[in-house]
Amino acid sequence: MEEQFHYSQNPQPYADEDEIDILDLLLVLVKNKWLIIGITFLFACGALIASFVMTPVYRSSTTVFLSRSDQSVFIDKNTDYVRSVSTFTPELITKLFSTNDVVSKTKANLPQSEAISSITLQATVDNKTQIITLSTTASTSTLSAMAVREAINVAQSELETLIEDKNSEFAQLENALIFEINEVQKQLSEKEEALARYIKQVASTQQNAQLLYPSSSFEASQKASSLYALPDGGLEYLRHLREITLLEDQYRMLQQRKAALSELKRPISISALGKNISSSLIKPKRTLMVVLATILGLFLSIFAAFIREFMCNASKDPERALKLAEIRNHFFHTNPK
């Protein structure tokens, strides 16, 4: 009775056959350590060999700037200030580097080799600073740096062609402005002569004529009262003045546009900021490849170790061995119907 009571007070722990024991798992890993090490080592060596076999890719980059920004002109009518915005913008120069002409001519100017076909050009612009960054990729650092310099030279040549086309357009605009300026100047002279004739007709004395041409603020204050003495109350006189003022504003605006067009004919150059062009290896990333391959090999080797241990245990169990034989039969043999 005492033994039964003692057994009921201290029951033996129930051993679950399906419970996973960490020690058993560690034992499997230790037993298959050389398999795990071998597979992991093979994956690491394979990645290392592949990194040396792969064709390397180098990137060279530099900062590109414009020596002068071309401008489109807007005239503020009330002031002599000429406001301007860029026409040959950094965005346009960025697109110029990506054109087929610049890319093909850049490759044609480089030393002939099989690696030229792998050269790529890429230009980006910072919207805040308006700084252009030109990057090239090639199989060698020397070839990549040469591609940057050649791309700048080719883009400069293409830009000069665009400037010549623009200058021809500017010349046509300038001729049209000169014609328009002459017409406005002619109309202005006619309006001034018409005003002089009108004043000669309505001004009876020299004193009245001087009031119509005030030279001081005091005389200007008397001018309004003198207009009432005119036959039409000064309406015709004010009309002449308004027409002359409008023509003078138009003449001034056209002169400013002509001056601005002359400024636009100045050449623009594309230059690299600094003579040294830095190059760096971007592919293959050897360290990253070896690390990833090692991790992958480790996981696969651990999985293979557990599969191996399971197969060994199953072969010793008659029931499981029969199931494994049936599985092999389904995979490697065809049962006749």
Image: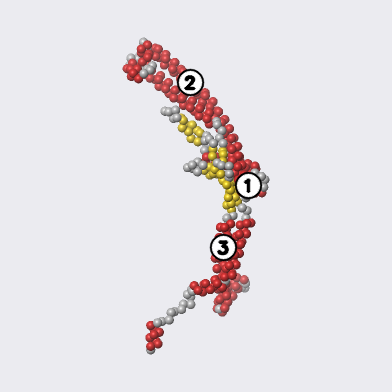
Residues at marks 2 and 1 touching, judged by CB atoms closer than 8 Å: no
Q: CA distance from mark 2 to mark 3?
A: 85 Å
User: If you read the primary sequence from the N terminus, does the residue marked by circle 2 or circle 3 appear first?
Assistant: 2
Residue name at image x 64 percent, y 47 percent: 116
Mark 3, residue position: 294
Label 1 amino acid? Leu
301 to 101, vertically: above or below: below
Q: Nearer the observer, disc 2 or disc 3?
A: 3
Q: Nearer the viewer, mark 2 or mark 1?
A: 1
**Label 2 vs label 1: CA separation?**
61 Å
Circle 2 sits on which residue?
A: 185
- Label drawn at residue 77: none
Distance between mark 3 and mark 1 Cα atoms: 33 Å
Q: Write the residue at 54% across / 71% down.
A: 29
Most extreme residue toward the bottom is: 1
Percent coordinates x, y for residue 80 in the rendering? 44, 28
Residue at the (44%, 24%) spot, across then down: 249
151 is higher (above) or lower (below) than 40 = above
Q: Helix, strand, or loop for circle 2?
A: helix
Name the spot of residue 256 as percent of width and height, x first.
Answer: 48, 27
Quadrant occupied by the N terminus = bottom left
Query: Compared to 103, does 194 lie above or below?
Result: above
User: What amino acid is at disc 2?
Assistant: Gln
* Secondary element at image label 1: helix
Mark closer to the chain start, 2 or 1: 1
Q: Residues within 10 Å of mark 3 (few under 14, many from 20)?
A: many
- Residue 223 visible, this angle: no
The residue singled out by tag 1 in the image is 143
Count of numbered marks: 3
Q: Residue at image x 45%, y 30%?
A: 81
